Image (spheres, rainbow, N blue to C red):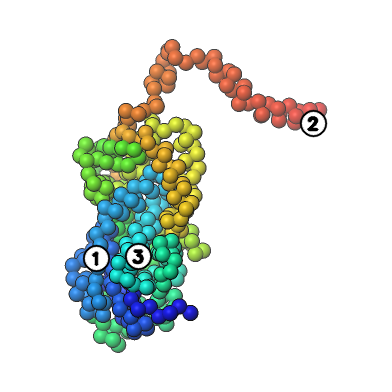
């Protein structure tokens, strides 16, 4: 059995769950608790968290602005890989967890803490993502996951716990779903969405305009790339986080980036998720477009075959695993020529690529033209086809001999 920790860093939001956890940790372990909040662009009011955490028993509250690190070191590498989980999910929640856990571990080291704690439940993916990251950074750290050990089982239990201990919380009506937001996306799960036949309510979506209500006039946006990373929007160079925010704003106006899926959680069950990823959707399509003219065919074919594996590693929490790092090195090597501009047409929920150009383009109209040319001998195709058909011809001849 692990020794009682003396100092614990808690991933803290100020909500019901983490307010209860903070008090429970102090009661259970008689330890100092440091509240840690990561600002990854969730858009929530972070003012007053320090006072709230201290009033609940924290020795201090540390708020870290991780927006640029999140965009530059986590979202952008994932976008370079064109990672999509199970064909639809752009991994907005999955990619946020390692940056939060990494920052927590930095606080734990700096503060001399011997344990960290989180409010993820025992049914979800987040517990895995947080803890795999923590163990990859410092395997000696103790991880406390109250939802897997305490006797509380519901929101009602948590509210009663707060009443009994006079914990200052604001009790609001329970939403018909749970929501999680960051710079890259918003997710909605649970509640009314657990019935997979229920259509998401129109007023549920926080960012994107309903495509039916979006402008009747298309909008065009040009995204500039250098070595696989987006660097500009409409010719204006922007920092990674600002660039994603700008595209979120533009894409949301046109209802871009809504996804409704049933996904397979790492722990085993299926789960329905509804997501808004307007900027990420634009970036994923723009990136593929600039790659299409700058990356060799066979390199793209091999890289695309790795997308499901890479996406699965991110989804399951293996961001700091050697296999993800290996794939990233291979993918990034293929990005050295991915420089150029892509023009996207936004209209009624769609983000369509309508133009692409690059100083490193492999597209040559002299070879591709349907008009007469002097660079390609069409007669060469005869031998090319016959050689590629050789194994097919041999098999067919064998089958004919067998049937005779």
Rendering quarter of residue 80: top left
Q: Which residue is mark 3?
A: 105
Q: Residue at x 46, y 55 (%)?
A: 321
Q: Residue at x 41, y 64 (%)?
A: 138
Separation of marks 1 and 3 at Cα, in angstroms: 14 Å
Q: Is residue 388 left or right of residue 311?
A: right
Q: Which residue is mark 2?
A: 402
Residue 24 seen by the camera: no
Q: Nearer the viewer, mark 1 or mark 2?
A: 1
Q: Nearer the viewer, mark 1 or mark 3?
A: 3
Report helix, strand or loop for mark 3. Answer: helix
Vertically, is 379 above or below 304? above
Q: Nearer the viewer, residue 170 or 175?
A: 170
Dot 1 or dot 3, earlier in sequence: 1
Q: Which residue is mark 1?
A: 63
Q: Is residue 336 left or right of residue 300?
A: left
């Amino acid at each position: 059995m692990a020794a009682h920790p003396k100092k614990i860093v808690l991933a803290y939001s100020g909500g019901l769950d983490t307010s209860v956890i903070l008090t429970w940790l102090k009661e259970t372990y008689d330890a100092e608790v440091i509240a840690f909040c990561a600002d990854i662009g969730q858009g929530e009011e972070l003012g007053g968290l320090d006072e709230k955490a201290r009033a609940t028993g924290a020795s201090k509250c540390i708020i870290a602005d991780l927006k640029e690190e999140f965009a530059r070191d986590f979202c952008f590498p994932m976008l370079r890989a064109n990672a999509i989980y199970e064909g639809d999910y752009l991994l907005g929640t999955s990619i946020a967890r390692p940056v939060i856990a990494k920052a927590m571990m930095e606080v734990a080291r700096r503060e001399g803490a011997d344990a960290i704690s989180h409010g993820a439940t025992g049914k979800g993916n987040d517990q895995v993502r947080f803890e795999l990251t923590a163990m990859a950074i410092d395997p000696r750290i103790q991880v406390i996951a109250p939802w897997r050990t305490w006797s509380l089982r519901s929101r009602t239990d948590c509210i009663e716990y707060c009443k009994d201990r006079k914990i200052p919380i604001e009790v609001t009506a329970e939403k018909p779903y749970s929501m999680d937001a960051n710079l890259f996306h918003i997710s909605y799960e649970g509640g009314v969405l657990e019935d997979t036949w229920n259509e998401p309510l129109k007023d549920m979506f926080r960012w994107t305009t309903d495509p039916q209500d979006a402008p009747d006039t298309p909008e065009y946006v040009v995204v500039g790339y250098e070595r696989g990373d987006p660097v500009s929007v409409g010719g204006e160079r922007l920092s990674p986080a600002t660039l994603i925010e700008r595209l979120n704003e533009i894409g949301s106006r046109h209802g871009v980036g809504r996804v409704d899926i049933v996904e397979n959680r790492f722990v085993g069950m299926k789960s329905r998720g509804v997501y808004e990823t307007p900027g990420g959707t634009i970036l994923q399509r723009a990136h593929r477009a600039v790659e299409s003219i700058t990356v060799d065919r066979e390199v793209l074919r091999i890289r695309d075959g790795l997308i499901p594996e890479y996406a699965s590693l991110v989804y399951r929490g293996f961001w700091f695993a050697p296999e993800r790092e290996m794939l990233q090195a291979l993918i990034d090597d293929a990005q050295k020529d991915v420089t150029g501009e892509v023009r996207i047409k936004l209209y009624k929920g769609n983000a369509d690529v309508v133009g692409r150009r690059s100083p490193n383009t492999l597209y040559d109209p002299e070879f591709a033209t349907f008009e007469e040319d002097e660079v390609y001998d069409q007669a060469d195709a005869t031998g090319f086809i016959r050689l590629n058909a050789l194994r097919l011809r041999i098999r067919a001849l064998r089958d004919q001999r067998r049937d005779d």
